[in-house]
Image (cartoon, rainbow, N blue to C red):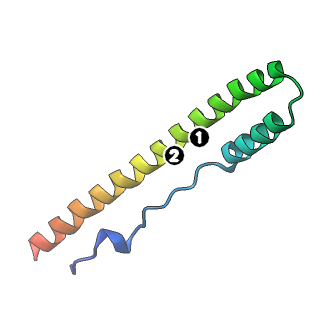
Amino acid sequence: MPYISPEAFCRITYTVPAYTEARIKSLCAEALAAKSAADVDRIVAELRVALEEHTLLAKALLEGQFSNLAFLDRVARWSTAKE
C-alpha cells in the first residue's frame, strides 16, 4: 500500500454550530442597545455563558480533529512499515 499522508485526508478546520455565533452577536447587539445598567448586567451574564459554550464546543471539535490526525499518522506509519 502506498504512503498516504494524513494531510491528504483532512485539514484542521472546524465549524462551531452557527447558533452559538448568532447568540453571541445577538447578545452583543442587545448589550449595546440596553437602556439600564441592570439590563447590561443581565445581558453580560448571558453573554458569558454563550461565550463559554462557544469556546467549549470549539475546543471539543479541535480535540477531535487532532485525535483524527494522530490516528491517521499512526496508520500511515504502520502502512509504510509494512512495505
Type of amino acid at the residue the image marks with label 1: His
Q: Is residue 33 left or right of residue 80?
A: right
- Name the one closer to the observer, 66 or 33: 33
Q: Is residue 53 left or right of residue 10?
A: right
* Neighbour tally class for label 2: few under 14, some 14-19, many 20 plus, Cα within 10 Å: some
Q: Is residue 25 left or right of residue 35?
A: left
| CA separation in Å, label 1 and label 2 | 6 Å
SS assignment at label 1: helix
Q: Are marks 1 and 2 in contact (CB under 8 Å)?
A: yes
Image point 59% across, 50% down: which residue?
16
Report the disc number at residue 45.
Answer: none
- State the quadrant of the N terminus: bottom left
Residue at mark 1: 54
* Neighbour tally class for label 1: few under 14, some 14-19, many 20 plus, Cα within 10 Å: some
Q: Position of residue 49 (x, y in %)?
A: 63, 29
- Position of residue 40 relative to residue 72, above or below, is above
- Name the one closer to the observer, 55 or 66: 55
Residue at mark 2: 58
Q: Position of residue 64 (x, y in %)?
A: 41, 49
Farthest residue in the top direction? 38
Q: Is residue 80 left or right of residue 69?
A: left
Q: Position of residue 12 (x, y in %)?
A: 43, 62
Image point 86% across, 31% down: which residue?
34
Quadrant hosting residue 6? bottom left
SS assignment at label 2: helix
